[in-house]
Amino acid sequence: MTRETYQRMTEYIKKDPKKVWRINRINQLLTGIVFCAYPLFLFMLFLEKEAFLIRAVVVPAVSFGGVTLFRYLLNVPRPYEKFELEPVLEKDTRGKSFPSRHVFSVYMIAATVFVYHPDAGVVLGVLGLFLAGIRVAGGVHEPRDVIVGAVIGILCAVVGYYFIPIA
């Protein structure tokens, strides 16, 4: 993404305070839906005494830790830092842009839910597409950040749920 592309995209939103308010609220809403769905899903597994519960906690936790460490070590600047422009989304974090941990988390959770409830997992995955778009349009991530975040989330789930044998 170039400075001009970033500026054109964010200025379209920033020139209308209602658009800024909407994109910030949609970002919060989508994030909230997914991050409420996950503990509810875990609680459901607990009530059903489902053995998958342990994996549904451990695989995302280990993956999240790995992605967090990876981001910390790379410390890629965010678009608003790189281009010295104000983001649309309320954010002041420095670095740690690649990969998007929001998008990684959505796809990790969607894939976790998908193992047990495919339809619900697909719905969460679609919400992830919207969240990824908002994170880019809001100026806090570049397209590669959200794409790689989604891919890593899905790959970690596939490896954790399908390739690592249960003890």
Image (cartoon, helix red, strand yellow):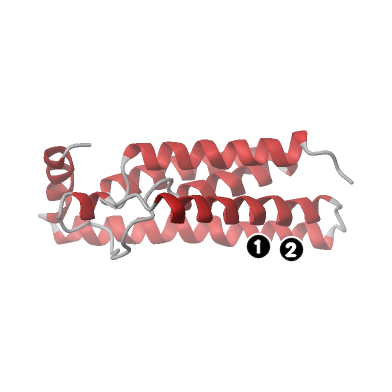
Residue depicted at x 38% and y 42%? 145
Indicate the amino acid at tag 1. Answer: Pro
Q: Position of residue 139 (x, y in %)?
A: 25, 50
In the rendered view of the protein, which quadrant contains the N terminus?
A: top left
Residue 74 vs residue 105, the one in the foreground? 74
Q: Quadrant of residue 136?
A: top left
The secondary element bearing badge 2 is classed as helix
Q: Position of residue 37 (x, y in %)?
A: 60, 57
Residue located beneath label 1 in the image: 39
Q: Nearer the viewer, residue 47 or 133?
A: 133
Residue type, mark 2 in image: Phe
Q: Of the numbered discs in the image, which one, if any, rests on residue 43?
A: 2
Q: Residue at x 14, y 42 (%)?
A: 3
Task: From the top left corner, tell me how far across and down residue 57 is, in percent.
Answer: 72, 57
Does residue 126 appear anywhere in the picture?
A: no
Instruction: Name the residue rendered at 74%, 40% in the picture.
Output: 161
Q: Is residue 133 left or right of residue 63?
A: left
Mark 2 and mark 1 in contact? Answer it, CB < 8 Å: yes
Q: What residue is shown at x 33% (from left), y 38% (from top)?
A: 143
Residue 136 vs residue 161: left or right? left
